[in-house]
Image (tube, rainbow, N blue to C red):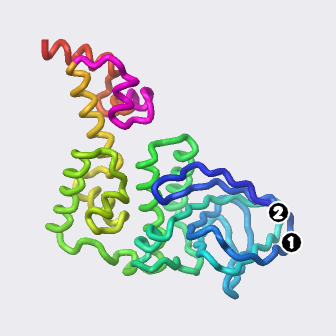
Amino acid sequence: MLSVRTVLDSDGVRIADVACHNTRGRGRPHRQEGGHAIVFVRRGCFLRSANGVEALLDPTVAYCLNPGEEERYDHPHGQGDDCSWMRLDTMLAASLWGGEATLPSRVLATSAEIDLDHRLLLAASRRGADPHELVEQSILLAARLLEQADPRRVEAGRPATARARRAVADAVREALTADAGLSLRDLARMLAVSPHHLSRVFHAATGHTIARYRMRLRARHALERLAGGERDLARLAGDLGFADQSHLCRVLRRETERTPSALRHLLAMVYA
C-alpha cells in the first residue's frame, strides 16, 4: 500500500513524498504507467525486478522509472520504506538524457552530497518554496545523478565555446527583463538549449540560478515602485509576480536587509 503526497507539480516536474506500508513478502507484477521518474530511497530496503533484472534498493541509491516497464517490488522486511519521486515529462526526460526518452535502467549510487540535496529539495517543496527555484534545482539534481550513468550523454548539446555560453546567459537576462514570468523551460525552448545546460551556463556566467536572478529583477521593480510612492504591498506583490505580500517582504529583506516600509521611507527621503 502506497501513500503519495505531491509537494510540487510545475513546468513538467512533479515531486512526491511516497511512503510504502507493504508487509514483508513478494509483490505482484504490474506495468509501470506513471511516466518517467527518478526515485530516491530515503528509508528502508526493498527489491525491484524490472525487465528481468533484480536490484536491491536502499537509502544509498536511486533508480529510474520508464513508462511501460514490467516491474515487481518485494519486501524482505516489514517496516516499510520511504522514497522521493521526481517525475519528469517526456520532453524533459529526453533533454536530460541526450535526446532519448528512456532513462538508464541500472541502479545509481547517490553520493552524500546528492542525497542531502535531494532531501533539502523535498523539504523546500513541502514548505511551498518558489516553484521556479524548485523546478530548476530538480532539473540540476536529476542531471547530476544521471551523469553517473553516462556523463557524455548528459553533456550532449551544451554550448561549446565560452563566447556561446556568454551569449546564452545574456539572452536569458534580456528575455527576463522583458518578461520575468518566463520559466526555465520557456527560456530553454527560446534559446534551443536543454534546461539543465541553460541553468548551468547561466550560473557559471552570473553566479546566480535563473530563479534567483528572476527574483532579483522583481525586487528591483518593487524598489522602483516603492520609490514612486506605492503603498499597497498586496497589489505590488500581485503585479510583479510574487506569491503574496509575505513573499515580497521576504525577498526584499533578503536583497536589501530592510522591510518595504523602511525602504519606502528611505527612498522618499532620498528623492524628496
Task: State which quarter of the image contains the C terminus.
Answer: top left
Q: What amino acid is at disc 2?
A: Asn
Q: Which mark is residue 22?
A: 2
Q: Position of residue 220 (x, y in %)?
A: 24, 34
SS assignment for the magenta stretch, majority: helix
Q: Are marks 1 and 2 in contact (CB under 8 Å)?
A: yes
In the image, what residue occupies the spot 32% across and 27% down?
A: 257
Q: Which mark is residue 267?
A: none
Horizontal side of 212 relative to 108 (left or right) equals: left
Q: On screen, 75 above or below 230?
A: below
Q: Which residue range is magenta in the image?
A: 229-250
How far separated are the C-alphas under marks 1 and 2? Answer: 8 Å
Q: What amino acid is at disc 1?
A: Gly
Horizontal side of 59 relative to 255 (left or right) equals: right
Q: On screen, 251 above or below 82?
A: above
Mark 1, residues whose alpha carbon is within 10 Å: few (<14), some, or many (≥20)? few
In this rendered view, identify the residue nearer to me: 172 or 152. Answer: 172
Q: Position of residue 92 (x, y in %)?
A: 44, 67
Mark 2 element type: loop
Horizontal side of 166 relative to 137 (left or right) equals: left
In this rendered view, identify the residue nearer to me: 171 or 109. Answer: 171
Q: Position of residue 269 (x, y in %)?
A: 17, 12
In the image, what residue occupies the spot 26% across and 40% down?
A: 217
Task: State which quarter of the image contains the N terminus.
Answer: bottom right
* Residue indicated by mark 1: 25
Mark 2, residues whose alpha carbon is within 10 Å: few (<14), some, or many (≥20)? some
In the image, what residue occupies the spot 54% across and 52% down?
A: 9
Task: Indicate whether residue 246 is drawn in magenta.
Answer: yes
Mark 1 element type: loop
Task: Indicate whether residue 201 is drawn in magenta.
Answer: no
Q: Position of residue 237 (x, y in %)?
A: 37, 30
